[in-house]
Amino acid sequence: MREPESHFLPRSGKVLVVRLSALGDVIKTIPAMRALSEARPDLHLEWLIEDQYASLVESLPFIKRTWVFPRKKWASPAGWLRMTRHLAGIAGGQWDAVLDFQVNPKSQFQAAITRAPIRITRKKDTERRSIIEQNADLIRGLGANIKMKKSWKWPLPNQCFQSADLKGNGYPVILHADTTIYGRDKAWPDSYWINLATELKAKGVPVQFLRPPSNSRIAILAAEAGCSLTPLAPNIPALAYLLDHCRGLVGTDSGPTHLAAYRTVPTVALFGATDPAIHAPCG
């Protein structure tokens, strides 16, 4: 196992976390940052993240400020202006340290222009170790004596779900059958989902399919299984609230599954091409 580099963080120092995406990877970064916040409560922690996941980081009580990378809104003159303002905002050396958990050209460029005196990047691990433990190693490199905790059901801001009835119908088991376009190799065959839903219903267990923002395939699956869809969560804290009110989740290796497991929801994660020894949920 690679020994983490050792760095010194000044008392009351400002630290920027760079983990832009995706949802599951952001969730697997939270345990290490929570551990750092508990070991060094004097630190001022901020987070740089893509716009579509910002609501999650904004709900974390130990993050003092969220910097939003406007990934989805820059392909226009107004978008270019937003991007220019964003890059100008993070440039100029306002942080004592930048922790790059993302490790790709986007994150490395943004970490570099901060001109922080300490910039630490998560190194690629050659062993089959959990990403969560690899993230913890980066924090240990700051000299912090951290204690990692497997799960956390942090309080959610009320305004995230006041306008919608997000509780599932009859305390259901939720089936999360969706994948992103980059994760098609994580998909489970449709017939398996239908068979699982049918067997659960035969045992008297209410079942709902997790409603994605837009995916007609999931609606067809639910109809074929004789199930309804969950309410549509307008943001990630609202999704967390919805998951908190189900009896369990069965899902693909993607963001909602990792969110459910980390928030102590009984979870079965289904793995395809990805290695569960490295990518298993935290919880």
Image: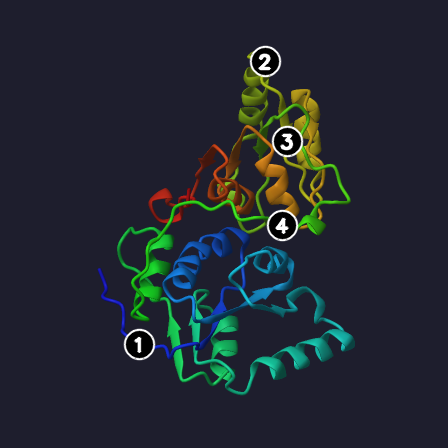
Label 4 secondary element: helix
Disc 4 target residue: 236
How many C-alpha atoms fall within 10 Å of the one at disc 1: few (<14), some, or many (≥20)? some
How many C-alpha atoms fall within 10 Å of the one at disc 2: few (<14), some, or many (≥20)? few
Disc 3 target residue: 209
Disc 2 target residue: 204
Q: Nearer the viewer, mark 4 or mark 3?
A: 4
Quarter in which the N terminus is drawn: bottom left
> Alpha carbon of mark 1 to alpha carbon of mark 2: how far?
56 Å
Left of 165 or right of it: where is 155? left
Q: Earlier in the sequence, mark 2 or mark 3?
A: 2
Q: Amino acid at mark 2?
A: Gly
> Alpha carbon of mark 1 to alpha carbon of mark 4: how far?
34 Å
Above or below, 130 relative to 210: below
Disc 1 target residue: 7
Q: Amino acid at mark 1?
A: His
Q: Earlier in the sequence, mark 4 or mark 3?
A: 3
Evaluate if marks 2 and 3 touch, with contact meaning CB atoms under 8 Å apart.
no
> Alpha carbon of mark 1 to alpha carbon of mark 3: how far?
46 Å
Q: Amino acid at mark 4?
A: Ile
Looking at the image, which is closer to me, 248 or 159? 159
Q: Amino acid at mark 3?
A: Phe
> Alpha carbon of mark 4 to alpha carbon of mark 3: how far?
17 Å
